[in-house]
Amino acid sequence: MNEIFNLMFCLGLYGLWRIAGWLLERQRAVVPWRKVRIIWPLFMLLWGWGIFWMLRSGLTDQWLVVMYAVFSFLNAPAMLLMDLAGEIAGNKFTLPDWQRYLFGSVLLWGSNFALVLLAEARAWSNIPSALNLEKRPDIVRAHERQE
């Protein structure tokens, strides 16, 4: 039964990535990439700290389980990276709690930042560079400021 759940989870991640790629390619010119690079990782970090606070304060609710499931689904690559880094760091030396929380926060924010960069690169990857059919708004604005 666990293998079926893992397979469905992986297929769901793949489907989410395909849908996100399709949406990003359609809306690539109107997405404010500079803002998204900061806001998305910050939102994920605050969401993770909110869940952590609820778990530490003893709140057990069905909404907490749903919030954690959605958070885990959206942050699966980051959580796998954090788990791997935690295993490596945990086997070598022990860290005080505040350092583990800081390390996890930096890793979560950085991995979500990298995910946004990857999504931006994916959104702009299918444009023929020689034809330049669709101009990137940030490059056009920078060029206009120089003139």
Image: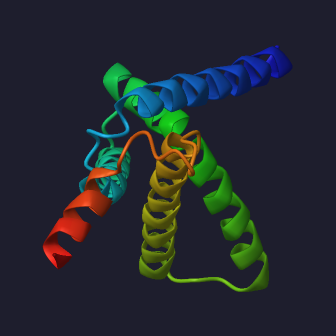
Please give the name of the residue rendered at 46% of the width and 47% of the height, measured from the top-left corner: 132
- Residue at x 57% of width, y 53% of height: 78
Does residue 131 show up? yes
Position of 37 compared to 17: left or right? left
Q: Position of residue 137 (x, y in %)?
A: 27, 52
User: Residue 117 in the image: x percent, y percent?
Assistant: 48, 57
Quadrant showing the N terminus: top right
- The image position of residue 108, as x and y in percent, is 48, 60
Front-most of residues 144 and 32: 144
Residue 68 at x, y percent in the picture: 44, 35
43 in relation to 6, above or below: below
Quadrant placement of the C terminus:
bottom left
Of residues 110 and 123, the one drawn nearer to the viewer in this rendering: 123
Is 26 placed left or right of 35 in the picture? right
Seen in the image, is 87 located left or right of residue 137? right
> Image quarter for residue 82?
bottom right
Residue 36's place in the image compared with 7, above or below, is below
User: Quick one: 44 or 30, which is closer to the camera?
Assistant: 30
Q: How is the image coloured?
A: rainbow
Residue at left offset 52%, top offset 38%: 72
Judge by depth and name the residue closer to the eye, 140 or 48: 140
Q: How many callouts does the rendering have?
A: 0
Residue 39, visible in the rendered structure = no
> Residue drawn at (45%, 52%), measured in percent from left and top?
116
